[in-house]
Amino acid sequence: MSPDLNQLRLEQLQATLSSYADLVKRQAPSRGWLKLIREALGRTERQQAQRMGITGPTLHKAEQSEADDRITLGQLRKLADGLDCELVYALVPRRPLTEVVQERARAIAVEEVGGVAHTMGLEDQRPSAERLRKQVERRTDELLRGRWSDLWR
């Protein structure tokens, strides 16, 4: 995939994920969403289980599984539907993805340029700090224009 297309895809994904960023700061209820919503609706376990065509103990186990972070997405989706709710699922990066990619390219560039500078230093020909900085910038740009899959070798 071309670097421009990679960048565009990354920026579009970041824009989509930005609406989820505020949700990361919120904790799920300790007893789980399923139980909290069911109780807010005034339904007992038995009533909710009947509405869904499952047994009370099955619903109880599912609610406990959600609270313990052991429930599957498929099961959670089905149970959410039984509460007339939508399951919203997203992975929200801790940092902007563009920053992650640029940081990785820069780390590789520093490693590569640093290795050459070290060898040159052994020969008493080490470049100036400013020249090294420019070489790192140039190599970082080259890496970002190349195949991004190569950044994660």
Image (cartoon, helix red, strand yellow):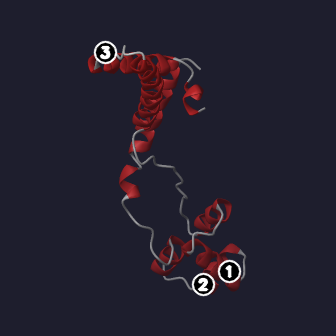
Determine which of the numbered discs, if any, sits on residue 131 in the image.
3
Q: Is residue 2 above or below residue 13?
A: above
Residue at the spot x=49%, y=78% of the render? 31
Determine which of the numbered discs, if any, sits on residue 99 in the image.
none
Determine which of the numbered discs, if any, sits on residue 50 in the image.
1
Residue 149 pos. (x, y %): 59, 28
Would you call the spot at circle 2 few (<14 residues within 10 Å), some (14-19), or many (20 or more)?
Answer: some
Callout 3–callout 2 Cβ contact below 8 Å: no
Amino acid found under the numbered disc labelled 3 = Arg
Which is nearer the eye, 132 or 9? 132
Residue 101 pos. (x, y %): 46, 32
Alpha-carbon span between mark 3 and mark 2: 69 Å
Q: In the rendered structure, which disc, 1 or 2, sits on the residue that comes first in sequence?
A: 2
Q: Which quarter of the picture shows residue 135?
A: top left
Residue 52 pos. (x, y %): 68, 73
Which circle, 3 or 2, is nearer the viewer? 3
Q: Which quarter of the picture shows residue 68?
A: bottom right
Q: Return the residue at label 2.
A: 45
